[in-house]
Structure formats: C-alpha cells, structure tokens
Amino acid sequence: MTQSPTRRTVLLATGAATLAVGCSEYGNQNSDSGSSSVQAGTELAKTSEIPVGGGKIFKDEKVVVTQPKKGEFKAFSDICTHQGCQVTSVSGGTINCPCHGSKFNITDGSVANPPANSPLPEKQIKVSGDSIELA
C-alpha cells in the first residue's frame, strides 16, 4: 500500500526547490569568475583618478584598482568570491559586495568581512607615468 504525500510535504518540497533555484541564480549574473575579454595594455585610468586609501571599479573590464598608499596601485577581480556578484563600491579601506555584505581589503584583496572566505584574485596592472594599464 502506498501513501500519497501530504499537502505539507508537497509545499515544503516546492518551497525548497524554489529556494534552491533562486539561490543558485542569485550570484550567477557574472559567473565567469572575473575573466575578461579586455586586452593587456588597455588603459584603465590615470593615476589621479584612483583616490589614496580607496579605489575605482571598472565594471566592463571586471577589475577594481586601488591605491592603498600614495603611489602604490593594486588591482583585483571585481567578482565576489562568495557567490559571484559584482562588487559595487570601494570605501573605508574595503572593496564592498552588495549581495551579502562581503568586504575585501584594498591592500591585498583579503577578506575583511565574511561571508566570503577567499580573497579577490589579484589582476596584473602596469603603471607607466600617469597611466594605469592592464598587464
């Protein structure tokens, strides 16, 4: 003798499936893990455009350039390592993801605030005079 599932079981299963699909899609707007089709040598900015103690996000290039100390420039992927959302701001010494509140240090991309538990991958840049280019 087989029993039909109860209404509660059907509702719970449907809700769980909906939640799983919703969560798996949430971070996939940029699921390429920071890869970019931008060529090496592409100028990103002038050094004067990157604030000391802050940074600037280059959305199309999927790169964040920071200047932790005057004259020291760093670059990282702008794709959060938690669920693949694109970071949207640089302030207070951190690169900030809007999806779940992860924050990354502008000096080395390390996690300053979870839920991310991996640092932002570093990107290679070249500073020539007052120009910052992808290396």
Image (cartoon, rainbow, N blue to C red):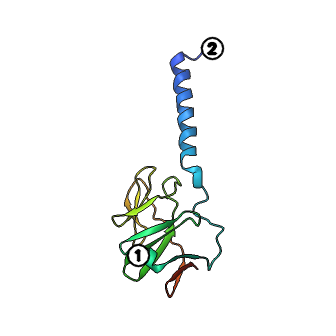
Residue in the image at 58% along x and 55% along y? 30
Residue in the image at 45% along x and 74% along y? 49
Give the Cα distance between marks 2 and 1.
66 Å
Q: Amino acid at mark 2?
A: Thr
Q: Is residue 72 above or below residue 103?
A: below
Residue in the image at 51% along x and 52% along y? 83
Among the 4 quarters of the image, the one containing residue 39: bottom right
| Residue, far bottom | 129
Q: Amino acid at mark 1?
A: Gln
Residue 24, given in percent of the width and then of the height, sits at 56, 44
Count of all numbered marks drawn on residues in the image: 2
Sort mark 1 into few (<14), some (14-19) or many (20+) by Cα contacts within 10 Å: many
Residue 25, given in percent of the width and then of the height, sits at 58, 44
Q: Is residue 84 above or below residue 106?
A: above
Q: Which residue is mark 1?
A: 67
Under circle 2, the secondary element is loop
